[in-house]
Amino acid sequence: MTIPKFTTIRQIPVGIWMLGFVSMLMDISSEMIHSLLPLFMVTTLGTSVFAVGMIEGIAESTAFITKVFSGALSDYLGKRKGLAVFGYALGALTKPLFAIASSTGMVLSARFLDRIGKGIRGAPRDALVADIAPPEVRGAAFGLRQSLDTIGAFLGPLIAVGLMLLWANDMRAIFWVAVIPGVLAVLLLLFGVHEPSRKEHPVHLRTNPISRKNLKRLSASYWRVVAIGAVFTLARFSEAFLVLRAQQTGMSIALVPLVMVAMNFIYAASAYPFGKLSDRMNHTTLLMIGFAVLVLADLILASRNH
């Protein structure tokens, strides 16, 4: 029996690294804002915790729904990069709105547009990863991109903590700084990533990927994974509540983003190794292990006495 070899970093195409750095820069930008946004809404704008939950729910559901259509559109057009650039650009353009927000409604609008951008870019970007990466290193390629993405999610709150201490909790000023990595992400994607050529179908032969006919072509196994994923998504809760809970326990406002730093550090450290593991391990088994860890985490949180 031949034991498959682990993928080395050198086998990962340059384009995957570029996409990873694009994700990292955008996550630095987003997490600088998101790690402070719940506190900003509650302490500065006077938003209720219930309203914070509603805004987060609307924002995340918008991203999930948009992904369906952006992925289908990228298949129909046969192009990935253009949609990804548009999605990242939309996300970057929303960052100044948080800095100038004077009401909860304005924050809701900014979050809504930001998550539309995330939904638009997510599927084409992942499809671009699959197009660039050779099949034998595809799992490692996705893991690397996710690791760099999560490094950004780790660095963003860490930068926010430093600036909060430096600028006496001036959250609006930090939101303005967050614009910079967002713009850099768009520029890097635009000029640093080359989309591989793909065989294009004539316009008259293209079909709607989410039509009933094409949906029937998806196997029962695919729909089982979708159903399981949908059920376990119900077990997720917004990180906004973790941020608010940390503040309620008496943690200094400037240090509250450290909660996101700790969470994303673990995420970043595990994404690439598990991506590599998926290249040589049964995907269903690995997925079920991940779900089991999620259930265990929820049970631990539910059993904690505060």
Image (spheres, rainbow, N blue to C red):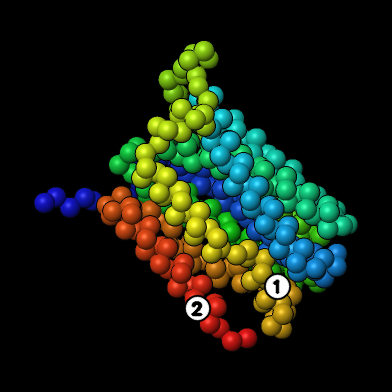
Q: Say few, some or many: other residues with alpha carbon within 10 Å of mark 1 (under 14 / 14 to 19 / 20 or more).
A: many
Q: Position of residue 75 (x, y in %)?
A: 50, 29
Real-space CA distance between mark 1 and mark 2, rounded to the nearest whole angstrom? 18 Å
Q: Which residue is at a point 40% across and 49% down the rendered structure image?
A: 224
Q: Is residue 11 left or right of residue 122?
A: left
What residue is disc 1 on? 244
Q: Is residue 41 left or right of residue 215?
A: right
* The furthest residue to the right: 102
Q: Amino acid at mark 2?
A: Ile
Q: Which residue is at a point 45% across and 73% down the rendered structure image?
A: 296
State the residue in front, 81 or 193.
81
Which of the image's four quarters has the C terminus? bottom right
Residue 191 seen anywhere in this rendered image of the structure: no
Q: Quadrant of residue 196?
A: top left
Q: Which residue is at a point 63% across and 65% down the rendered structure image?
A: 239
* The furthest residue to the bottom: 305
Q: Position of residue 174 (x, y in %)?
A: 76, 60
* The furthest residue to the left: 1
**Which SS class for mark 1?**
helix
Q: Position of residue 219 (x, y in %)?
A: 37, 39
Q: Quadrant of residue 22?
A: top right
Quick one: label 1 or label 2, which is nearer the N terminus?
1
Q: Amino acid at mark 1?
A: Leu
What residue is disc 2 on? 300
Q: Is residue 83 left or right of residue 273?
A: right
